[in-house]
Image (cartoon, rainbow, N blue to C red):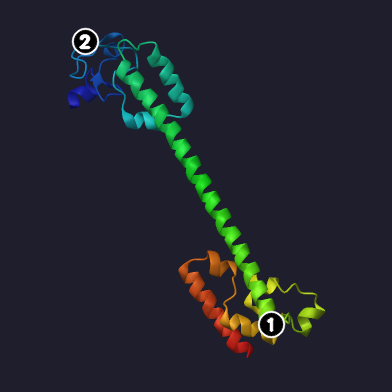
Amino acid sequence: MEAYRHGRYNLRDQLGHYVVRADAADRPCHHSCCAGERVHPKNLPVKINRQYLRKLSDQDLEIELGQYSRFIDTHEGGFLQIVAELDRRDESEKRAAARKQRAKERRQGRESEYQDEVYRQWLQAEAETNGYMLNKAGKAAGIDERSLFTGPQSRVAKYASRELRDYFDAHPRPTRVSWFGSAYARRAHYAGQRAGASGAA
């Protein structure tokens, strides 16, 4: 092997063959893959290393395709490898776009469900509190009572009526953390709500 690396076989082609420079251009390949029956045009191996193909940019891959299309009679395998790689990338892009679209639709669906839940609880709270959802400070500040369903607990403690705080004790507020957060975030959120409720009592 050292003789190959440092002797006259000092050029390594894309197949991993050690060859002299003349052998890499327009002469039959003497390795087992070709058995002296195929010609390697300069820098154009019959079989292309898959990792090499995957590292090429789209533009470079198109250039390779153009090169191999000129020698398709003797290099059909390499030509088909490039076509397969182009197809693989096309399918990968389509799958990525489909995943992105599905994720977007899931987010939109969850957001719609969340808004519906906020509205449902607001209607239920309005009925159970007979419309008394703000304390004097909330009314004086012109607070929108719906903001108390999704905002921070401190806002509830400052502006919510006794009736609304009692409602929240029985029906945890549909905040974004409770709806979209991780299990850990939801536990911490509910713990904070209980602490806030007990502190306001």
Q: Secondary structure at mark 1?
A: loop
Q: Amino acid at mark 2?
A: Glu
Q: 5 or 167, which is in the foreground? A: 167
- Number of disc labels: 2
- Give the labeled residue for mark 2: 37
* Residue shown at 55% from the left, 55% from the top: 107
Residue topped by disc 1: 129
* 3D distance between C-alphas at marks 1 and 2: 90 Å
Q: Is residue 59 left or right of residue 15?
A: right
Residue in the foreground of this view, choosing between 182 and 57: 182
Question: Which quadrant holds the N terminus?
Answer: top left
Q: Amino acid at mark 1?
A: Thr
Check residue 12 in the rendering and tell me which mark sits there, or answer none: none
Viewer-nearest of labels 1 and 2? 1
Residue visible at 19% across and 18% down?
A: 31
Q: Position of residue 129 (x, y in %)?
A: 69, 82
Q: Quadrant of residue 136?
A: bottom right
The residue closer to the viewer here, 44 or 191, is 191
Please give the name of the residue rendered at 43% of the width and 37% of the height, measured from the top-left corner.
92
Task: Specify few, some or many for label 1: CA neighbours under 10 Å numbering under 14, 14-19, or 20 or more.
Answer: some
Q: Is residue 62 visible?
A: yes
Note whether 165 is above or below 33 in the view shown: below
Q: Is residue 30 left or right of residue 54?
A: left
Q: Position of residue 99 (x, y in %)?
A: 48, 45
Marks 1 and 2, the one that precedes in the sequence: 2
Q: Secondary structure at mark 2?
A: loop
Contact, mark 1 vs mark 2 (Cβ under 8 Å): no
